[in-house]
Image (cartoon, rainbow, N blue to C red):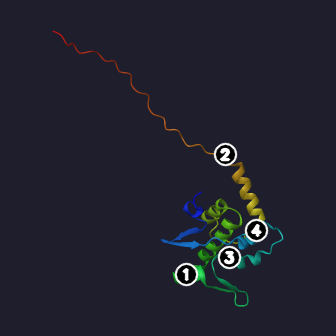
Amino acid sequence: MRDLREFHDPNLYLPIDGTVYTVKSPNAELGLEIRRFTADPESDPAEEIYFVAKLLGAEYDKDTDSMSGGLWDEMVANGVPYEECMHVGNTAMAHYGVSPEFGEMWWETRLGKERPIQPEDIVAWARRAWEKPVEKEPVEKKPAAKKTTRSRKKTTS
């Protein structure tokens, strides 16, 4: 069998203003922690910032309410606004904590509406995705070919 990396890239790539920021896929242990956190209705939403920091390769300091290191520092150095930095982190939580499809929906529709992911968000999204009718590709209709009648040229005189 071929090596998995030949056809699968587990990382998340998020473009902002021409720069693509790479959120590295969490290892198995962190991935399971994130999945448990997002699925548990008893999870404390205030704790999500710690998972966001880990996904960004950064450290969160509760005492100073600050984050530093990794992708966070890269975005700050590039002048990415706070709201967009948090959007990257929350999108990564949605992507790795629920599914790539949920992450894509979060990236494209949740900017400016940032808050920790709630289990009911996941349920509502899944319900909409499940109930949404599958759109079929439109079939291009080709105009019917014109019928032509041919007559043979006279070859003898």
**Distance from Cα at disc 3 to Cα at disc 2:** 33 Å
Disc 4: which residue:
38
Measuring 68% from the left and 76% from the top, which residue is drawn there?
52
Disc 1: which residue:
74
Circle 3/circle 1 CB separation < 8 Å: no
Residue 51 in view here: yes
- Left or right: residue 70 versus residue 17 is right
Measuring 55% from the left and 78% from the top, which residue is drawn there?
80
N-terminal of the pair, mark 3 or mark 4, is: 4
The amino acid sitting under disc 4 is Thr
N-terminal of the pair, mark 2 or mark 4, is: 4
Q: Is residue 144 above or below residue 42?
A: above
Disc 2: which residue:
133
Secondary element under disc 4, as helix, strand or loop, is helix
Circle 2/circle 1 CB separation < 8 Å: no
**Distance from Cα at disc 3 to Cα at disc 4:** 12 Å
The amino acid sitting under disc 3 is Val
Secondary element under disc 1, as helix, strand or loop, is helix
Mark 2 Cα-neighbour bin, 10 Å: few <14, some 14–19, many ≥20: few
User: Where residue 109 sits: x, y (%)?
Assistant: 62, 63
Disc 3: which residue:
52
